[in-house]
Amino acid sequence: MIGALLERNPRFANWLYGFTPPEHGTVVLVHRRVYIVPTQLGTLYALTLLILLIGSINYALSLGFALTFLLAGMGLAGMVHTARNLARMGVSVGRAEPVFAGETAQFRLFLEARGAFDRPAILVRHVRSRAQMVVDVPPQGVAEVVLGVPAPGRGWLPLGRVMLETRFPLGIFRAWSYVEPDARCLVYPRPERSHLPPPCAESAKGALRSPTPGNDDYAGLRAYQFSDSPRHVAWKAVARNEDMLTKQFTGEAAAELWLDWALLPGHLNVEQRLSRLTGWVLDAERAGMHYGLRLPGVEIAPGRGEAQSGACLQALALHGRT
Amino acid sequence: MKALPHPLAPDLRLLTLRDLMWLTGSLAIIIAPHALRAPWWLTLLTLCLYGWRFSCTLSRSPLPARWLTLGVAFVAMLGVWVEYRTLFGRQPGVLLLMLFSGLKLLESRTHRDGTVAAFLGYCLIITNFLYTQSIPTALTMCVGVFALTATLVSFSAPSRPVRSNLRTAGLLLAHAAPAALALFVLFPRVHGPLWGLPQDAYAGMTGLSDTMSPGNLSQLALSDAIAFRAAFEADPPPQPLRYWRGPVLWDFDGRTWSTESVYPIRFEPPANPQGVFRYSVVLEPHNHGWLFALETAISLPSAARMSFDGQVLANAPVRSRLRYDLTSALAPGPARDESRAQLARALRLPPGYNRRAIALAQDWRAAGGSDADVLARGLDFLRKGRFSYTLEPPVLGADSVDEFLFETKAGFCEHFASAFTVLMRAAGIPARVVTGYQGGDLNPVDQIITVRQSDAHAWTEVFLPGRGWVRVDPTAAAMPQRVSAGLARALPQGEGLPFMLRADMAWLRTVRYRWEALAHKWNVWVLGYGPERQRDLMLSLGMRDADWQKLTALLFTFLGLMTIALLVWSLRRLARPDPVQKAWHAFCAKLAARGVARAPSEGPRDYSARAARALPASRRAILRIGALYIRLRYGNGVSAPGAARLRRLVRELRLA
C-alpha cells in the first residue's frame, strides 16, 4: 500500500528517501538515508529480555539483572553496528554491456567501504526486478555487484531504484537504504532470424568490384586487419611463425549489402521491422559482409566489424526514441 | 509481483555444520552446570539429542519427523514427572528447559530456528543463577554469553572468517558494557517476588534449624558453607567473646529441644552499655526468620524486631542474601526481670527421662549454697568428667542426657548444651538452650569475619536473680580450646574436617583469605545490590528520595547519551579524512596563500612542478612533497610512516 502510494507520488518518495534520482557519480549513504527497524527476530529478542527481566525480579537474581542488562545493552550496540554496516558506503556504477531485448542486462555496481572495518553480508536488490546479490565489502575496499535486470524492450534501460540492506551483526535489526544511480543499459531490438536479403538491385548503384557473388571462393591472403573475423585468419600461416594473414574470399569483397527499412514488406509493424533488421545486421556481420543500414532519417554507410555493427544496432535500438 | 527468496531472511538459510558447532558448543557450556545437577538419564538424553542433530547434518539426512520429536518430548516429560512428581517446580522446570534446548536444536533447520535456540540459551544461562551466583559461575556464564553472541554473529555473516566474528562479538559486548552498568545501577529495583514461587524455590539452604536434637549440629559442622560475614567498624572482639546469638530453645521433650512460639516485644535500648561494637552483617539466605547478632544487641536493623528472649527477628524469612547493620555491647548494662511464667517454663523437664542426671543435680542443690555455687558445681563436673569432643558422637537412646553424661562421655556442643541445661533445670535454676555460631574466621586481607556452618554452636543461658540471663558455655568448660582456638584445634587429629578448615597449609590459607575477601566484595556490591543499596548509593551521590521516575529519567538520559556516543564513534572514524589527503590540502592551502592556487583540473605532478617554478626558493621541498604525495596516493597503499613524513614535510615547509 505504501509502495503504491510512493509509486504515485514520486516527489513524496524523493523527499522520504532523501534524494532526487538519478544520482550522478558516487552516491554516499549518509545517515539521513539509512533506515533501521527491528526484524521479527528483534521482537523475539525483546520478548526474551522481558522474560529474563521478570525472572530476575521474581527470584531477585542479581546476576540475572546483569545478564538482562548486558543483553539490552548489546541490542542497543547491535542497532548502532547494523546502521554502521551501511554508513557512508559509497555506491558507484560501472558500464553495462548492451543486450538484446528479452535478455538480462548485467548492471555493475561498486560498493566502496570507507573506514577500517569490513561490511559483511550486504544485500543489494534491484527493486523493480528483485534481482539481488549478497556481498561482503572488505575494509577500505570495493566489492563488485552484478545485478541481472531483465530487459524486456529496446532502448535505454535505466537501472532504477536499488536497495541496500543488512542485518549484520545480530540479525535483530534491519538497516536499509535506497539509491538510484545514473546508470543505463542499451537494449537492442530482439533479433529475428530470417534469410539475408540478396544484395539487390539497389546495391548496383555502388561499385560492384566482382560479378561473382560466391562467398567461399578462396582468392588469396592479405595482411590481417584488426576488424577481421578470426574465422578468416590463416592460422596455418600463423603457426609457421609468419605474420597474421587473412584469407580473402572473392564473395566478401563483392557483397556490399544495404539493409533498408524501406525494402521490408509492408505488413510488418515498426518493432517487427526493427527486429528483422537487427537479425540481418547480426547475420551480415557474422558472414563478414560489408553492410550499411538505412532507417527513416538515419543512414549508416557500409562497413564491417564491431564498430559498424554497434552503430547499426544502436540506431535500431534508439529508433524513434530520443 | 512474486516475493523472491530473500537471501538475508533467516528462515531461508540453512544451518551449516559450522553454525551447528557454534550453537551446540555454546549450549553445552551453558548446560554444563545443570548437567551435574540433573538425573543422569536426562543429561544423557539431552546430549544424545545434540548428537542426533549433528549426525543429521553430517549424513545429510532429513531431520526427524515432528511426531518423533514430540514423542521424545513426551517420554522425557514423563520421566521428569516420575522423578519429581511434578513438572512445575524449580528443578523440574529448569531441567525441562535444558531438555527443550536439545529438542529445539533437533528441529532447527534454518538460521531462524538456530536464533530461537540461541535465545533459549540466554534463558538457560539465567536458570544457572537460581542455584549459585558465585564468581566462577559468573565467569563460566560470561563465556557462554560470548559464545552465543558469536553464534548469532556467525549466523548473520556466514561467509566471514571465525576470527572476525569473534572480534565483532567481543566488540558488541564491550559496547554493551556501559549501558549494562548504567541499567544495573539505575534501573529501579523492586522487592520480588512478583508472584508465588514454586514450593521448592528455596530448597537446599543450609543453616541452623528451629529445633536441636543430638547429632544435628555435628552434621552441620561438616559443612564449610558460609553462614554470614561481618564487617566491624573498629577492631572486632576477640574470638572467645564472639558468640553470635540465634534461635533460643525453651522446650525439651527428652530428646529434642524446640520452641513453640516466638513473639516480638517493644525494644528498649539499654541506658549505659559498655564495650560497644558497630558492625554490618551479610547473611546468607537460610529460609528462617532469625538474624544473627553478636551478644548482646543494643540496636536493631531497620526491618527487624526483638523477641522476648532476645532474638533479632527479620520481618520475613531470609530468602536472599541480606545485609544489615547492628550495634552490640559486651556488657549491656543492668538486666531486666523475667516473667514468672517464663521462669516456670525454663524449669520444666519431661517426666520419666534422665533420672540419673536429675538425681545428680538434686544432690548439688542439696549440698546448699546459692545458685552461683550450684552452677559452679555443674561446670566443675564437666571440666573433670573426662569428656571428649567429637564430630562423630555415638548414637544415643531414649535417656540421651544420662547416656552422654555417664556412659559415652563423647559428644558435640549440642550434647553438652542439652545435658547442662537439663542439669540446671533439675537443680532448680531456670535455663534455656541458645543456638548460633561461635567464633568465625578473621580475614587479614579485608578484616572481615567469615562465619561458616562449621562454626555452629549451642550453649546455655541460666537465670540468676539480680543478674538476669547469663551465658554459660558448657562446651567451653569441658573443652576450653573449642572457644579459644576454634573447632579445628578442639577436635582430635584425624577427624574429617571440611577442607577449608584444616589448619595446615599456610599458603592455602592465604589464597583462601584473598579469595574470600573478593567473594565478600562480590556479594556486597554485585549480588547484594538491591532497592536499599540503590537508595544508599543515590543518596551518597547527592540524590535525595530517588524514586523510580527520577531513576528512569536518569537512566534514559544516560542511555541516550551512550547511543549518541556510539554513533559518533562509528561515524567519526568514517568522516575522518585520510591523513595523506589532509596533509596535501594543507600543502595546497600554503601554496595558495603565496598566490599559487591549484586549478581544479590540475593533477599533483603538474601542480607541484608549477609551484616549484613559481617559488624557486622552496623548489626542492615542494617537489619532494609532490613526489611523496603521488607515491602515497597512487602507490601501493598508505603506510603510516610515509603519511607521518608527508605531514612533517608540509608542516616544516617555509615559503619565503
Image (spheres, coloured by chain):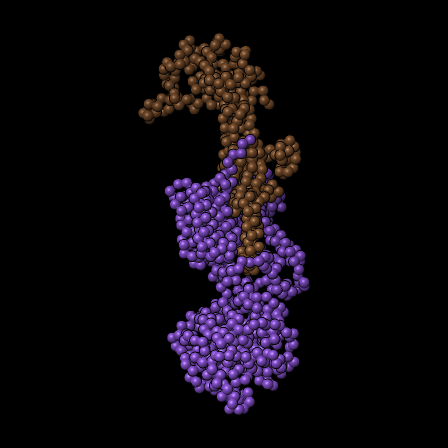
Chain colours: A brown, B purple
Res. A233 image quadrant = top left
User: How far across and how far down the image is residue A99, in percent?
Assistant: 50, 26
Which residue of the protein is positioned furthest toward the right in this rendering?
B544
**Residue A77 makes an appearance in the image:** no
User: How far across and how far down the image is residue B648, in percent?
Assistant: 54, 51
Residue at x 55%, y 64% (from the top left corner):
B319
Which residue of the protein is positioned furthest toward the left in this rendering?
A240
Residue at x 51%, y 57% (from the top left corner):
B90
Of B415 and A24, which appears nearest the observer? Answer: B415
Total numbered badges shown on the rendered structure: 0
Screen quadrant of the N terminus of chain A: top right
**Residue A60 makes an appearance in the image:** yes
Which residue of the protein is positioned furthest toward the front in this rendering?
B352
- Name above or below for residue B82 compared with residue B593: below
Screen quadrant of the C terminus of chain A: top right
Of B426 and A158, which appears nearest the observer? Answer: B426
- Name above or below for residue B317 compared with residue B308: above
Of B12 and A155, which appears nearest the observer? Answer: B12
Res. A155 image quadrant = top right
User: How far across and how far down the image is residue B373, in percent?
Assistant: 53, 89
Residue at x 55%, y 62% (from the top left corner):
B526
Residue at x 66%, y 60% (from the top left corner):
B547
User: How far across and how far down the image is residue B395, in percent?
Assistant: 41, 74
- Name above or below for residue B435 compared with residue A193: below
- Name above or below for residue A99 compared with residue B419: above
Of B424 and B179, which appears nearest the observer? Answer: B424
